[in-house]
Amino acid sequence: MILMRILRLVSFLEGVSYLVLLLIAMPLKYVFHQEMAVKITGALHGGLFIALAGITLLAMLVAKLPFKTGLLLGLASIVPAGTFLADRLLKKHEQTLT
């Protein structure tokens, strides 16, 4: 199902943006005083975080994503690299749909 592919892609991009924010943009801001790095990366990450939440809710309604999986994905998005671990659950659900 295309919705699950989109969810997995947005989840991956959100995870990458979080790591870039923490590992690249934050050191640029606090070590090299480049505040623009955090403004740009933070805005991108925030948009992806909101998109992830919305698409997760949509997948719970349309693709019958289990509540537990949606909740775990939401919690995983708070932990650095957590969305990469949660991708296994999303892939498993995607395979049950086909």
Image (cartoon, rainbow, N blue to C red):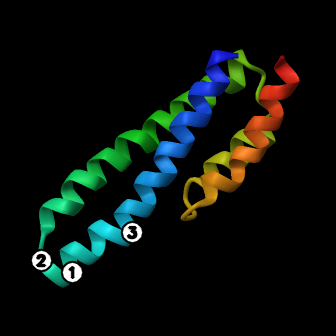
83 or 66, which lies in front?
83
Left or right for 48, reference 93:
left
| SS for callout 2 | loop
Horizontal and vertical percent position of residue 56: 61, 32
| Mark 3 nearby-residue class (10 Å; few <14, some 14–19, many ≥20) | some
Disc 1 from disc 3: Cα separation:
11 Å
**Residue 47 placement: quadrant:** top left
Which residue shows up at 38% across the image and 71% down it? 23
**Residue 65 placement: quadrant:** top right
The disc, 1 or 3, on the residue closer to the chain's N-terminal end is: 3
Horizontal and vertical percent position of residue 43: 27, 48
Horizontal and vertical percent position of residue 39: 19, 56
49 lies above or below 22: above
Q: Which residue is mark 1?
A: 30
The amino acid pointed to by label 3 is Leu
Outermost residue to the right:
96
Give me the disc on residue 22: 3
Q: Which residue is mark 2?
A: 33
| SS for callout 3 | helix
| Mark 1 nearby-residue class (10 Å; few <14, some 14–19, many ≥20) | few
74 lies above or below 78: above
Dots 2, 1 in contact, CB < 8 A: yes
The amino acid pointed to by label 1 is Tyr
Left or right for 16, reference 9:
left
Left or right for 50, reference 94:
left
47 or 4, which lies in front?
4
The amino acid pointed to by label 2 is His
Give me the disc on residue 12: none
Which residue shows up at 20% across the image and 84% down it? 31
- Which quarter of the image is occupied by the N terminus? top right
